[in-house]
Image: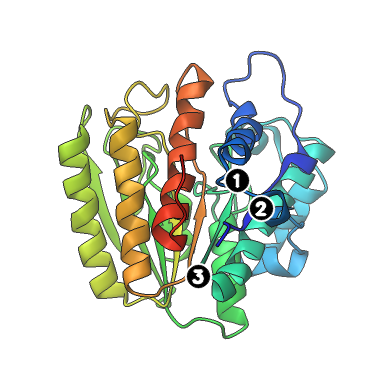
Amino acid sequence: MPVRAYHCEHADLPLPPHHPFPFEKYRETRRRLVEAGVLHADELRPAPAATREQLLRAHDLAFVDTFLAGELDADHQKRIGFPWCPELVARCLASAGGTVAAAWDALELGGAGHLAGGTHHAHRDRAAGYCVFHDLAVAAYELLAHGQVRSVLILDLDVHHGDGTATIFASEPRVYTASVHGAGNFPKEKPPSDLDLALPDGTEDEGYLQAVDQVLDQAFAEARPDFVFYQAGVDPLQGDRFGRLAVSHAGLEERDRRVFRRCRQRSLPVVWTMGGGYAKPVERTVRAHCGTWRAAAEELFGALVQ
């Protein structure tokens, strides 16, 4: 079975020269995956824009409307890391909408991915760290609001703690949040998830995979989910500019395989998003993101990928 995927290339964001965010990784990851046969053209779809109704399940009205109108104050806009422009609005709506669409497809297909998303630093009332609207929260509340699921696990293996995820769902018993992240990484303040495991600088494959297994065991046992969202950031990669861990490409792909295998063994639908990844040259980051999709294709759908 081919992998269903959403992309945001129709909502590209022009950035100033020398901006630190590697936007080219999205297009290049998609190109490599198509070239390798992991993604097929008939299963690769443009992400729809999230609706205001969908956004307001996860975000405050004042924040949503102020951002959409381009009226955030200068300090708030600076915390995002991107300059406001109509293209940023379109990108943020597509980033949230793509994860929502993938979630609906995963209910039918068992799994679907988004070649963007993972915006886990977005809070209910504010944006930060390249994240405006929390796509995972918007999608989780979409399924809950329509009675499609009863218990959701949001598993975050980005090197950065998902502080927005933790705060948005702090009082939501239907959503269990779990994170494995670098102790020394952004954000400085790390509000508690339901389950957190912070790793010391320089953690390599063996220690990292042990931590992932520990969190998988505990999270699946405690959450008893019927749906999984997986934030598959690849910034635990050794040498990532914004990370402080030392996981290899092979270690990251093995991490992904363990997550997808766990979902398949329990017949749980899963949506995965890209999340962080800032290694230079960008080819190192693209290789890591492609590993996530290869793992999904093989572990969830039995595809043989070269």
Residue 43 versus residue 218 in the image, above or below: above
State the image coordinates of residue 120 (x, y, percent, origin top left): 50, 49
Residue 263 versus residue 295 in the image, above or below: below
The dot on residue 115 is 1
Q: Residue at x 47, y 70 (%)?
A: 269
Outermost residue to the bottom: 147
Q: Residue at x 29, y 30 (%)?
A: 248
Which quadrant, please, contains the N terminus?
Answer: bottom right
User: For numbered disc 1, what is the local secondary structure?
Assistant: loop
Are dots 3 and 1 in contact, CB under 8 Å? no
The dot on residue 110 is 3
Q: What is the spatial separation of the Cα atoms under label 3 and label 1, in whole angstroms?
A: 17 Å
User: For numbered disc 3, what is the local secondary structure?
Assistant: loop
Q: Tell me where residue 100 sits by quadrant.
A: bottom right
Q: Nearer the viewer, residue 228 or 30?
A: 30
Residue 19 versus residue 288 in the image, above or below: above
- Residue position for label 2: 6
Are dots 3 and 2 in contact, CB under 8 Å? no
- In the displayed structure, does residue 283 sit left or right of residue 43? left
State the image coordinates of residue 102 (x, y, percent, origin top left): 61, 62
Residue type at mark 3: give it. Answer: Gly
Are dots 2 and 1 in contact, CB under 8 Å? yes
State the image coordinates of residue 234 (x, y, percent, origin top left): 42, 37
Judge whether residue 26 can be spotted in this image: yes
Judge whether residue 63 can be spotted in this image: no
- In the displayed structure, does residue 255 sit left or right of residue 104? left
Q: How many residues crowd mark 1 within 10 Å: few (<14), some (14–19), many (20+)?
A: many
